[in-house]
Image: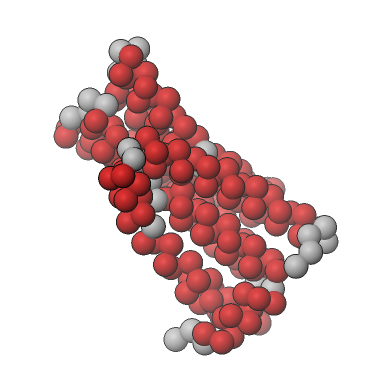
């Protein structure tokens, strides 16, 4: 069981860890839109059979990207990988909005456009997991890595409930709005991760 007092002390006292947790909360806002990609694809004209194909494209993206993420992390470091995949996170929501508009205009088949979106979702999800876990180990003190992992999980776990907020946005505004919020959160997450570089170089204060 996580020592709550120690968790709070680490969060307040370790600037690197605190910024990393903030970045992951922004990542939770990005993932808020995840359940709604299928709904958007169906609204754009995809059938139930098409959804199975799209989920297959997502799985293919996850499998085929593993070698790339592994090479990138080993060659350039986990922080570089984290920066790269957080920047890529801005692409699926933007493409979803753009291609949904193109489908409405009759200039793009729904299945073709959304297959690319789902492929990227699978690839980026794997990249985020690899980068996040690897980078957490890098910033954790050698003798406290299990504790830091526990603190991190305790602090970011509530972000898993953010799709409920996404549902509220869809209900009150529209599907497009939840993808717009996801895009903005992805951009903010990338900028936050970039601050980790500055912090490592001693350029960011607490």
As drawn, is 40 to the left or to the right of 74?
left
Please provide percent x and percent y for residue 169. Answer: 35, 46
Question: Farthest residue toward the front?
Answer: 172
Please provide percent x and percent y for residue 105. Answer: 33, 14
Question: Farthest residue toward the left?
Answer: 48
Q: Is residue 9 visible?
A: yes
Quarter that holds the N terminus: bottom left
Please provide percent x and percent y for residue 46. Answer: 22, 28
Question: Farthest residue toward the right?
Answer: 202
Counting every numbered tag in the picture gives 0
Q: Residue at x 65, y 72 (%)?
A: 140
Q: Nearer the viewer, residue 1 or 99?
A: 99
Q: Nearer the viewer, residue 144 or 178?
A: 178
As drawn, is 48 to the left or to the right of 44?
left
Residue 180 figure quarter: top left
Please provide percent x and percent y for residue 206. Answer: 75, 67
Q: Residue at x 59, y 47 (%)?
A: 188
Q: Is residue 144 visible?
A: no
Q: Residue at x 69, y 73 (%)?
A: 14
- Colour scheme: secondary structure
Vertical order, 59 against 114 (above or below): below
Q: Nearer the viewer, residue 14 or 168?
A: 168
Vertical order, 58 against 115 (above or below): below
Q: Residue at x 65, y 47 (%)?
A: 191
Q: Nearer the viewer, residue 2 or 131?
A: 2
């Amino acid at each position: 069981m996580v020592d709550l007092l120690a968790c709070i002390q680490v969060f307040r006292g370790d600037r690197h860890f605190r910024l990393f947790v903030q970045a992951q909360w922004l990542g939770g806002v990005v993932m808020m839109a995840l359940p709604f990609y299928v709904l958007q694809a169906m609204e754009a004209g995809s059938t139930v059979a098409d959804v199975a194909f799209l989920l297959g494209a997502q799985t293919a993206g996850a499998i085929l990207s593993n070698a790339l993420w592994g090479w990138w992390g080993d060659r350039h470091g986990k922080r570089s990988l984290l920066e790269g995949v957080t920047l890529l996170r801005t692409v699926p929501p933007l493409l979803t909005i753009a291609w949904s508009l193109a489908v409405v205009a009759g200039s793009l088949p729904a299945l073709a456009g959304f297959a690319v979106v789902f492929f990227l979702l699978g690839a980026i999800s794997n990249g985020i997991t690899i980068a996040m876990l690897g980078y957490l180990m890098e910033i954790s003190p050698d003798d406290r890595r299990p504790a830091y992992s526990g603190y991190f999980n305790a602090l970011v776990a509530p972000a898993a409930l953010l799709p409920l907020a996404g549902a509220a946005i869809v209900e009150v505004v529209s599907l497009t709005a939840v993808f717009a919020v996801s895009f903005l959160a992805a951009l903010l997450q990338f900028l936050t991760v970039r601050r980790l570089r500055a912090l490592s170089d001693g350029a960011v204060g607490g």
